Image: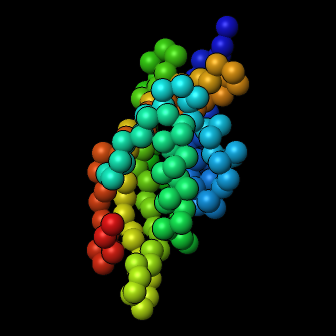
């Protein structure tokens, strides 16, 4: 019988997820944080179904954004049996260069998100099964996506 999800392991998952995004970690380090089956991710620019969709999206965005910093502001966990609904607010800062601009621009925003976290059957670890960006709240003076 697999163990129950805990709030601390979900918060650890969120912290690890953003650490991996900040350093543009290789897929072999990022994919184990996602559910192997039926993972769904909704970003402002795309809805992704499955790991292959995520990999294509990830490979694109790590070539667009640089000097990324994610800072968790809120992780609120509601455990419902074998899954958890998680409200996440993360401050995201990133630089982007849009040719032929002379300089890069800095994006600073708070992303309001809803996650569903489950246990991975093969590993028993908490993984992201659904990841929905509800809204992007830009800081004053921020560049826009």
Q: Is residue 46 visible?
A: yes
The answer to whether 62 is drawn above or below residue 17 in the figure is below
* Apparent side of residue 87 relative to residue 10 in the rendered image (left or right): left
Residue nearest the viewer, comparing 120 with 71? 120
Residue drawn at x 70%, y 25% is: 123
* Apparent side of residue 51 relative to residue 47 in the rendered image (left or right): right
Q: Which residue is at the far bottom? A: 102
Quadrant of the rendered image containing residue 80: top left
Q: How is the image coloured?
A: rainbow
Q: Is residue 10 visible?
A: no
The answer to whether 83 is drawn above or below residue 17 in the figure is above
Quadrant of the rendered image containing residue 51: top right
From the top left corner, tell me how far across and down residue 136 is, in percent: 31, 56
From the top left corner, tell me how far across and down residue 65 is, in percent: 49, 68
For the C terminus, give its image quadrant: bottom left
Residue drawn at x 36%, y 42% is: 47
From the top left corner, tell me how far across and down residue 57 is, in percent: 48, 51
**Marker count (numbered):** 0
From the top left corner, tell me how far across and down residue 91 is, in percent: 43, 60
Residue drawn at x 65%, y 48% is: 27
The answer to whether 72 is drawn above or below residue 138 in the figure is above
Residue nearest the viewer, comparing 8 with 86? 86
């Amino acid at each position: 019988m697999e163990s129950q999800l805990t709030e601390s392991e979900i918060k650890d998952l969120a912290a690890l997820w953003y650490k991996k995004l900040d350093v543009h970690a290789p897929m072999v380090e990022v994919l184990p944080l996602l559910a192997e089956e039926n993972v769904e991710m909704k970003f402002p620019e795309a809805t992704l179904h499955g790991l292959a969709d995520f990999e294509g999206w990830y490979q694109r965005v790590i070539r667009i954004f640089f000097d990324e910093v994610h800072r968790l502001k809120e992780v609120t966990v509601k455990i419902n049996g074998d899954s958890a609904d998680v409200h996440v607010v993360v401050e995201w800062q990133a630089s982007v260069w849009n040719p032929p601009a002379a300089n890069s621009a800095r994006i600073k925003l708070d992303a309001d998100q809803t996650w569903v976290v489950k246990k991975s059957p093969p590993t028993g670890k908490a993984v992201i099964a659904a990841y929905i960006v509800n809204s992007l709240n830009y800081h004053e003076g921020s560049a826009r996506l």
